[in-house]
Image: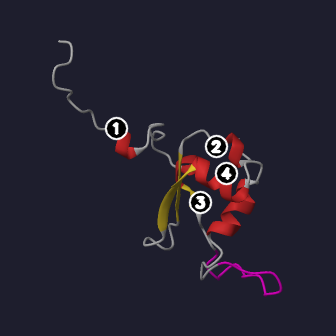
Amino acid sequence: MVERLSDFPWVIVRVDCPLCPHRRGQCRLARLAEKYGADIQLCDLMDKIAFDCPWKSHPGERPPNQYDPKCKARFTDLEALSSPPPDVPPMMRKLTVIEGGKR
């Protein structure tokens, strides 16, 4: 189980929310480690990433009851049922033909 950012297995960290389909994004692992530190717990990192979620309860507020929607932000690739993403950033996946190369 991945608990810290330093344990994250892929180069790209993707985040999404099943409640808010328009709230999704991705960031490079190195950039997150530089900004928040490599030893940050993933739950603390999610709190920082989804701080403005309308369904998130903040300290001092009444916690949501069982009928209120709760923030469902998640690390897409850690909780996805499909196969994990390739460990190569999208811009590097395309092959290029080099003129004059070996055949």
CB under 8 Å between discs 1 and 3: no
Tell me what residue is drawn at x 45 percent, y 43 percent: 82
Identify the mark nearer the N-term, 2 or 1.
Answer: 2
For mark 3, what is the residue? Answer: 74
State the CA–CA distance, disc 1 to disc 4. 23 Å
Between circles 2 and 1, the one closer to the viewer is: 1
Tell which of 25 and 83 is nearer to you.
25
Tell me what residue is drawn at x 67 percent, y 53 percent: 34
Identify the mark nearer the N-term, 1 or 3.
Answer: 3
Tell me what residue is drawn at x 69 percent, y 40 percent: 7
Identify the mark nearer the N-term, 3 or 4.
Answer: 4
Q: Amino acid at mark 4?
A: Ala
Quadrant assignment for the N terminus: top right
Determine which of the numbered discs, if any, sits on residue 8 in the image. Answer: 2
Q: Is residue 96 left or right of residue 41?
A: left
Q: Amino acid at mark 3?
A: Arg
| Residue furthest out toward the bottom | 61
